[in-house]
Amino acid sequence: MTLPDQPQSTSPLRAIRCYCLSCCLESLTEVKLCPAEECPLWPFRMGKNSLRKGRALSDEEKKRNAERLRTFKLSKSQQNAEKNFSDEFQSVIPCNDAFLEETLIKNGKYPTYPNFPEEDHHG
C-alpha cells in the first residue's frame, strides 16, 4: 500500500492516522473497530501513542487545570448566551395578537380589549 499525499509538516501520529483512514475507506468507525491487531500501526491508529505513559499531576496542577477548565467553560457559555441573545433580536419575531397577548401576560401586563369591560377582564 502507498501512503496518501500529505503535507511535509504532518506529524508521524497524524500520518499514521491518515494512513489508517485511507486503509479503512475514510471511515472513522472502521478505524476504531479495526481488527488488524497484527499491523504494526494498530496501536497508533487513533492518532495517539497508546504506549506512552502520561505524567502524574500534583494536586496543585490538578486544581489549576480544573480552575482553567471551569473558567473556559464559563466563558464559552457566556459567549453562547450573548450570541443567542443577539440572534434572538436579529431574527424576525412573528407579531400577531396571540403572540403579543402571551408576551404581555408573561411580563405581568394584561391586554385590554375595547369591547370588553375592564373590571370583568381581570377576574
Image: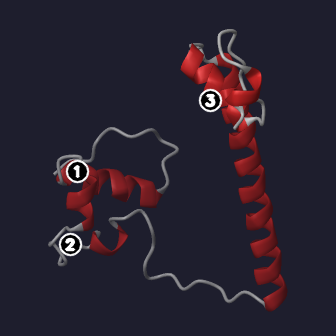
Mark sitting earlier along the chain (3/1): 1
Seen in the picture, residue 61 relative to 9 is either above or below; the reply is below
The residues tagged by marks 1 and 2 sit, at their Cα atoms, a distance apart of 18 Å
Mark sitting earlier along the chain (3/2): 2
The image quadrant that residue 101 belongs to is: top right
Q: Nearer the viewer, mark 3 or mark 2?
A: 3
The amino acid beneath tag 1 is Ser
Number of residue marks: 3
The residues tagged by marks 3 and 2 sit, at their Cα atoms, a distance apart of 64 Å
In the image, what residue occupies the spot 41% across and 62% down?
A: 47
The image quadrant that residue 66 belongs to is: bottom right
In the image, what residue occupies the spot 64% across and 20% down?
A: 100
Q: Secondary structure at mark 1?
A: loop
Left or right of 8: which side holds 41? left
Left or right of 8: which side holds 109? right
The amino acid beneath tag 2 is Cys
Seen in the picture, residue 55 relative to 27 is either above or below; the reply is below
User: Where is residue 5 shown, x and y percent of the image?
Assistant: 33, 38
User: Where is residue 61 shown, x and y percent of the image?
Assistant: 80, 81
Which residue has dot 1 on it? 27
Q: Nearer the viewer, mark 3 or mark 1?
A: 3
Asked whether residue 24 is in view, the answer is yes
In the image, what residue occupies the spot 68% across and 41% down?
A: 80
Seen in the picture, residue 51 relative to 82 is either above or below; the reply is below
Seen in the picture, residue 12 relative to 63 is either above or below; the reply is above
Are the residues at dot 3 and dot 2 in contact (C-beta closer than 8 Å)? no
Which residue has dot 2 on it? 39
Q: Considering the image in quadrants, where does the C terminus appear?
A: top right
